[in-house]
Every structure is written in C-alpha cells, then in structure tokens.
Image (spheres, rainbow, N blue to C red):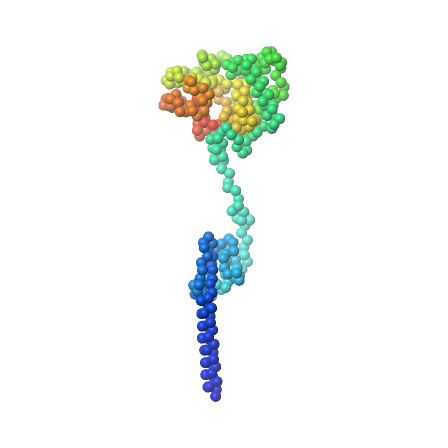
Amino acid sequence: MKRRVFLEGVLAGSTVTVSCAFMWGQLAKQVQHRVTVPGEQPIVLTDLEDIPQTIIETVTTQPAVADNALLVPGGKSHEYFAIDTLTPSQSVLPEPLAYEQPPLSHVQSSQAEPPFNFAQSYQTKIDNFDTYHEGDVVLSEQKFELLKATLATLTEAQRIVGHGNFNIINLDTMLKTYSRYSKRGDFPKDQLAFIEELFSAEAKEYGFFGEKIITQLSAVVPEKDINKIPGTGHFLFQGEALKLYEKVRSEVGDSLILTSGIRGVMKQLHLFMAKAVHAKGNLSQASRSLAPPGHSYHAIGDFDVGCKGLGKRNFTKDFAETDEFKKLQDLGYVNIRYTLDNQFGVRYEPWHIKVV
C-alpha cells in the first residue's frame, strides 16, 4: 500500500514538472525583450536564453534596464547593477553600501566654460585691429564729445604752427602760440585737463603694453639735435637715426621716402586722438593702430619710410608687398619695430624702422 502511494506521488510530480517546463518554453517563444545600448538602436531579443545573465554598464545616468529592476550604485566608478540580472557570484552587494556623492567641482566641470586663452585673444585683436572687441575701453558719450572738441582745437593749433613744426613743438610753446594767434584766445581749460588725463592714463588698461618713453607732457625736443629732411616736412635726430636713413636710401634708391620722423608729445597726441575719434571713442582700438602719447619711439629716434607714389597705403600692409620693402629686408641690417609677432599690442608695421 505504501509503495503504491509513493509511486503515484512520483508520477504526479513528474507530470506537473513536464507541464510547467512545456508551458514556460511556449511562453518564452512569445516574449520579446528590448535592451538599449546608449547611442545605438534597441536590440530585440526573442529568446530568454539570449539575455545575458549580467548587465553592467558604467554610466553617469540611469542605465537602460527593465522597468522593474532595482538599481544600486556600485562604488566610486559609478557602476550600476541590475539586481534581478546578477549571477550568484555577484548577488552580494559590493561594500560599502553607502553611495559616495561626486565632488561638486567634478559635477560642475562638465558645464564649465573653457579656460580663457590670452594669447589667442591677443592675436585675434591684432589681426583685426580696426574693429571693436569685447573688453575694449571706450569713452563715455560725454568724454567722446570732449575728445572731438579737443582734437579740433589741436588741429587748429597745428594749422597755426604749421604741419612740419607741429612735429617737434612742445606743450608750452603750443599753448603760447595758440593763445596769441587763435581767434578763440586761450586754449580751453577743460580740453587741456582732458589732454593731461589722457597722457597720464595707464595705457596697459586699454591694451597697449609698450614702455612709456616720454614721461613729461611738456617734454622738449632739442632743436640743436635735429635735422630737417628736405622735401619731406619731417625731422630726424642727428647721429644714428640720420645715418641709418641716409644709408638705406642710398642702397634702396630714391623711391624710398621718409614718411614720418620725430614726433613730439603734441604730434603723437594729435595722431592718437584722431585714431580715437575714428574709433568712436574706443581707446583700445586706437592703440592697436598707434602708440599712445608718450609711448612712441618716434620721440627718441625711430622713423617711418614708404614708397614714392603709394600715398596713404604706405601705412598699410600693402607696403610689405613693395620692392622697396623687399630691398630693405635684403639689406640684413634694418629692423622693424612692430613685427608680426610683436608683444606691444600694436598691429604689424613693416614701414616702422627701429633705431633705438
């Protein structure tokens, strides 16, 4: 009796097991699973046997797993484990269980702006010197009006004195001459104060990095030390400057001309103000084309040369394409003050001969 009951139980259990296995197999064939890999199309699995036993993805956001899977952080590497897919050997959660929050700096670094590249910004400004750039120093509307009025007064003074003489005139002589011959009388006090303010300003603040050569607004150009170059309206210092000019002209030819020689503070001030007015009060833009007053080497020896007949283009990169410039280079002893890679904050000036 006992033997019969035992055999009936075994038979019933086997039947249930076979039935369950058959039903499970049929169900598996009808079920489809989608596993999504970041950045790729979903992979469709049509058989449960095709599903990997372990799905471990290293991600910084929630990985693609079944909706009912419980995710548990897996440590400093930010791995996420789907518990219902772990193999027996992985079923024990890694220690420690507590998840360490990434440092705030790490989280923010992915959104931080790239570091400022000074060299790249500097070169961009030099290559595009005659336009506005972010960070440029621009005069207020009120100061811009004062700038234009002061330039007009200096232009009148230059007309009274003469263009050639204005190259070497100092402040005190200019004021006396203007007061004596101008119909307006004395030089306007507010404009004189503006001149002093502009001369005393720190040029580095608006992007010029050259040395300040002349530190006194009323500095005098000694007449005993200068020579007027015939047919040019310009002056050169005796000694090295005059000898260099005469030498290069004798070797390059008469087509090489002097376009600018000595510039006193007043002359440099007038030129700089004209640049600033052209730039709508942008002092940074002006300084990329011309050294601010007090910072020009023209005050102590440098001079500019050009090609006869080229006109204003002598003060552009066009001069570098002339035969005269190529001959200057071939001489081997002529140096340019503001080269293509100069660090003064000034555009390339192939016409500016370095003397000092």
Residue appearing at x 45%, y 72% in the figure: 22
Q: Residue at x 57, y 29 (%)?
A: 138
Residue at figure coordinates x 53%, y 31% from the top left: 132
Up the image or down, 54 lies above or below 122; here it is below
Q: Nearer the viewer, residue 13 or 284?
A: 13
Residue 288 lies, with reference to residue 157, above or below; the image says below
Q: Nearer the viewer, residue 75 or 55?
A: 55
Left or right: residue 130 versus residue 256 is right
User: What is the total number of numbered labels drawn onto the structure image?
Assistant: 0
Q: Residue at x 48, y 85 (%)?
A: 5
Classify residue 352 by image quadrant: top left
Percent from the top left, x then y, of residue 13?
47, 78
Query: Residue 18: percent from the left, percent from the top?
Result: 45, 75
Is any part of residue 244 visible from this angle?
A: no
Query: x and y percent of residue 95 in the render?
Result: 51, 60
The reply, left or right, for residue 254 in relation to residue 12 is left
Instruction: Kindly tell me whether residue 63 is visible in this rendering.
Output: yes
Q: How far across and how far down the image is residue 340, in percent?
A: 44, 29
Q: Quarter of the image for the C terminus: give it.
A: top left
Work out which residue is located at the far front of the displayed protein and give it. 30
